[in-house]
């Protein structure tokens, strides 16, 4: 590389980080926008008992693809792999926006189409978060990564605040379809910036991708999600379908473990779990995703139905959760950078998250917006202590050559926990709602209102229901949603217990033996990379 090229590349560290933050916002923004649009989607397509599949399909696609993206980045270089994941995500976004449109045959099969397209979108999203984490891990050593933790938390908070607001505004004033189309211009900017300005080392190894392991893992995870979704709902727990899925899950995962021990480049290197910290934070990530993603998707539903908020206002009402997370993440990040200590933060986070879920378990039809906001602040504080700290510990537990695999594994366990949580909590919600409505209105009315046979429960049309029916629906929704948070308490409490087993291992001050600082090392890496 000539001196002129180096002069152009060296300042790119901040530009690259900006591009990565945009990509991270793209992944975070989508989930938050869609959550506020979901009640309106259900109102158009029907099928309240299937609405969690819109989220489950996305999380499942993310879950099964995350380890693959992480390993591909390790083997073939992160830039091309990362950009490919963005393109797939944008294609999925465009398809989601067209679900149920005349182009695809109208609204009759709209919900099924949306679920399938969300899975495609999730396949791309699996590469976004792991790509950002791994690239930052290449550029910034763990000892100095804490200060970037605040930046990442800030982007997450902005996305979490802007997502519900944008999603609510779009849903109220345009169409829920624009909740997906809005990803396209933002993704276009991220692509342009990263393609033209991100210059990373481009390398390739002679090893092959462990496609057999990836297939077995995908089959096993999908089978488990179907079990948690269908068991006791679509099919009895002792039915042939559920028992068959159980056998499929066990056989697939056992075969996956055997394959991973023999291949040269396993998708999920099992030797990583020999490190106690990595094993503990992997389980913590699973439980965090289970409790957080599984329960949080019900907050906008509660606000728009029981509390009567518009889609836009339900976005505003999530602000206490986001600000609690943002402030605590920044404080924890700076403290880790200054002291190098991190063990106490996941412990505090687990306790605060448990308290937040316990408070949300007490909500009912009489819960005010102010009280709900205070409960969400507590939950946000817990999330702020846990989200980035768990990733930092996972990355510090492995060698630099396994950074992509470790980042992928950490993201994988959080995603799979979210997938299971959404499926299980969705089944619990649907079952409790149906039972509540059946006891108050009769089985036929319960079938129509909860399954979509009568159009589902559209928040915009609750006021048109007769008084006794409306009261029964609101009471059933409040009871069902509080029950979901009640189950989430157990998983949040397990996070606090497991955090005690984290060992305080000093954070590495550099990613290599040169002793360079974070910015010096990042600029050196960029300066030595071929421009392509």
Image (cartoon, rainbow, N blue to C red):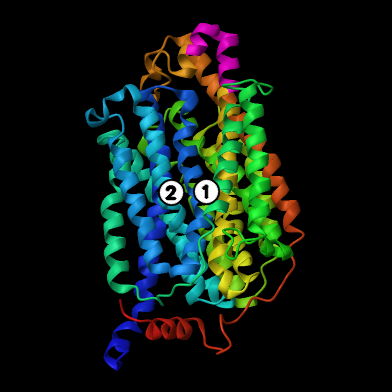
Residue 394 lies in what quarter of the image?
A: bottom right
Q: Residue at x 68, y 40 (%)?
A: 250
Q: Residue at x 50, y 15 (%)?
A: 471
**Magenta segment: does it hold 438?**
yes
Tell me the quadrant of the picture where the C terminus can be found: bottom left
State which region is magenta.
431-447
- Label whose residue precedes the other's in the sequence (1 or 2): 1
Q: Give the secondary structure at mark 1.
A: helix
Residue 265 lies in what quarter of the image?
A: bottom right
Q: Which residue is mark 1?
A: 64
User: 159 above or below 525?
Assistant: above
Q: Dots 1 and 2: beta carbons under 8 Å?
A: yes
Q: Give the secondary structure at mark 2.
A: helix
- The spot of residue 2 in percent (x, y) is 29, 92
Q: Using residue 405 as the reference point, say whether residue 528 is left or right of it.
A: left
Q: Residue at x 47, y 39 (%)?
A: 57
- The spot of residue 392 in percent (x, y) is 59, 66
Q: Using residue 10 as the reference point, say whether residue 255 is left or right of it.
A: right
User: 177 above or below 344?
Assistant: above
Decide whether the magenta segment is chiefly helix, strand or loop.
helix
């Amino acid at each position: 590389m000539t001196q002129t090229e180096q002069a152009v590349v060296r300042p790119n560290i901040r530009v690259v980080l900006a591009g990565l933050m945009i990509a991270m916002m793209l992944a975070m923004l989508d989930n938050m926008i869609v959550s506020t649009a979901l009640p309106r989607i259900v109102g158009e397509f029907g099928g309240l008992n299937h609405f969690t599949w819109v989220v489950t399909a996305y999380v499942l696609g993310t879950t099964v693809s995350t380890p693959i993206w992480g390993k591909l980045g390790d083997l073939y270089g992160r830039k091309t792999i990362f950009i490919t994941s963005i393109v797939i995500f944008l294609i999925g976004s465009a398809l989601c926006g067209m679900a149920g449109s005349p182009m695809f045959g109208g609204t009759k099969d709209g919900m099924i189409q949306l679920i399938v397209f969300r899975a495609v979108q999730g396949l791309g999203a699996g590469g976004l978060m792991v790509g950002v984490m791994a690239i930052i891990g290449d550029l910034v050593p763990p000892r100095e990564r804490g200060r970037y933790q605040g930046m990442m938390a800030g982007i997450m908070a902005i996305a979490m605040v802007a997502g519900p607001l944008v999603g609510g505004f779009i849903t109220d004033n345009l169409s829920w379809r624009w909740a997906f189309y809005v990803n396209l211009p933002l993704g276009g900017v991220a692509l342009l910036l990263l393609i033209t300005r991100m210059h990373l080392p481009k390398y390739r190894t002679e090893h092959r991708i462990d496609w057999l392991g990836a297939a077995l893992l995908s089959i096993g995870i999908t089978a488990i999600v179907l079990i948690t979704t269908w068991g006791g709902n679509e099919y009895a727990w002792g039915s042939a379908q559920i028992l068959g899925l159980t056998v499929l899950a066990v056989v697939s995962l056992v075969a996956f473990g055997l394959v991973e021990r023999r291949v040269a480049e396993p998708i999920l290197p099992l030797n990583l779990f020999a490190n106690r910290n990595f094993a503990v934070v992997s389980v913590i990530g699973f439980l965090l995703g289970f409790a957080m993603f599984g329960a949080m998707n019900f907050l906008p539903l509660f606000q728009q139905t029981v509390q009567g908020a518009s889609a836009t206002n339900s976005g505003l009402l999530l602000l206490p959760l986001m600000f609690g997370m943002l402030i605590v993440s920044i404080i924890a990040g700076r403290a880790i950078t200054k002291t190098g200590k991190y063990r106490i933060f996941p412990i505090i986070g687990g306790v605060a998250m448990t308290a937040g879920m316990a408070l949300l378990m007490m909500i009912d039809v009489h819960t005010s917006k102010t009280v709900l906001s205070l409960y969400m602040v507590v939950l946000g504080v817990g999330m702020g202590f846990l989200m980035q700290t768990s990733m930092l510990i996972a990355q510090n537990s492995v060698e630099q050559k396994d950074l992509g695999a470790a980042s992928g594994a950490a993201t994988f366990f959080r995603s799979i926990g979210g997938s299971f949580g959404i499926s299980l909590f969705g089944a619990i919600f649907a079952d409790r709602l149906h039972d509540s409505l059946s006891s108050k209105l009769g089985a036929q009315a319960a079938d129509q209102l909860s399954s979509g046979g009568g159009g589902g429960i559209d928040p915009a049309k609750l006021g048109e229901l007769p008084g006794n029916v409306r009261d029964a629906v609101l009471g059933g929704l409040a009871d069902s949603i509080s029950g979901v948070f009640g189950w989430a308490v157990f998983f949040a409490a397990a996070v606090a217990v497991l955090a005690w087993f984290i060992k305080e291992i000093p954070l590495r001050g550099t990613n290599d033996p040169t002793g360079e600082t974070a910015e010096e090392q990042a600029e050196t890496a960029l300066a030595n990379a071929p421009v392509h």
